[in-house]
Amino acid sequence: MLEFDLIARIRQRAAARADVVLGIGDDCALLAPAPGMQLAVTMDTLNESVHFPPETAPYDIGWKSLAVNLSDLAAMGAQPAWCTLSLSLPDARAEFIDGFSDGFLALAQQHGFALVGGDTTRGPLSISVTAQGLIEPGQALRRDGANVGDAIWVSGTLGDAAAALQQWQAGMPMHPALRKRLDRPTPRVALGRALRGLATACIDISDGLLADLSHICRASGVGARIDAEALPASDALCAVVAKDARARLQASGGDDYELCFTVSQGKSEAVLALAEKLDLPLTCVGQIQEGSALQCVGMGLDPVALGYQHFA
Ligand code: ADP
Ligand code: MG
């Protein structure tokens, strides 16, 4: 298949959106942002073997490469709008392109998100997505707004994706529910939108709770205490991993793409009401403190030793 046919296959599947004046096919896309809104722009790359196991299904690779970008928009409180896709492919197999674009565009459609352009080249399997969202001026959920005394909350459950990855690395079959969390993360877009005006800071958990929370602490000039006993675990995680090992995965495992956010004292009721409304567990896991230290009490975990970093 030629590059042109490959692009045509993606283009056929891409959905329209009213504010896309000109989509895939010209030198640039033309977009008409709603007046008065700010653009939230983010980019993430997924490389085979680094960000997903080589045997990952094309559908899941497509899904995940968009999900990680939507998760960044969610963490900012932005409404997803448009994205571009840079694909580096070792060969032009129709099964891969069709599976990939089905996964990518299924998730895009869930969020009214439009694919408006991209680039396609030959090379090792690598996917880069630039995602753009819209946010009301002054409403973005930044990392630098946490205050001493704020409660620290997380969405969903933690450690599932890391547990699946650990099973894969050990050559074991992955637990289906855990594997689903690794392959098809759910970006918490509705939660991010609902946290505008409520959260004082927010970040999505891609590298692990402690690693990502440390970014909030640094940006806000505060410390934090996490209660390891409070970290939410899924039934699947409890079934597969013993309690001590579990706490470590929950505190430091990456790839869950849940949101970690802080809210002022006295706002717990509002957060719990939100959990009910969105039908999504929201759990208070600690508190922002004075200083710069990140403490994790309850399970003998050392935060400094935890948290994934590339090139470490
Ligand atoms: P150019 O050489 O002008 O950059 P290309 O031949 O790379 O154009 O791409 C042709 C059109 O197809 C452009 O509108 C581009 O944005 C789009 N496109 C290329 N690759 C992709 C892709 N992987 N996903 C979506 N759109 C793509
Ligand atoms: Mg090009």
Image: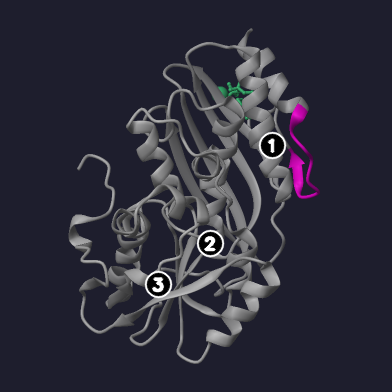
What residue would you read off at disc 1?
105
Taking the image as shown, residue 267 lies to the left or right of residue 14, namely left
Whole-percent x and y of residue 116?
Answer: 67, 37
Residue at 34% across, 65% down: 213
Q: Is residue 188 magenta?
A: no
The amino acid beneath tag 1 is Leu
State the extent of the magenta-drawn residues as a range: 13-22
Which picture quadrant has residue 294? bottom left
Residue at 46% across, 51% down: 239
Query: Tag 1's secondary structure?
Result: helix
Q: Quadrant of the N terminus?
A: top right
What residue would you read off at disc 3?
230
Taking the image as shown, residue 186 lies to the left or right of residue 204, namely right
The amino acid beneath tag 3 is Ala
Whole-percent x and y of residue 196?
Answer: 58, 74
Q: Nearer the viewer, residue 133 or 228?
A: 228
Q: Main secondary structure of the magenta part?
A: loop
**Mark 1 surroundings: few (<14), some (14-19) or many (≥20) residues within 10 A:** many
| 47 versus 255 height, above or below | above
Q: Which circle, 2 or 3, is nearer the viewer?
A: 3
Ligand 1 - quadrant of the structure image: top right
The image's mark for residue 156 is 2
Q: Which circle, 1 or 2, is nearer the viewer?
A: 2
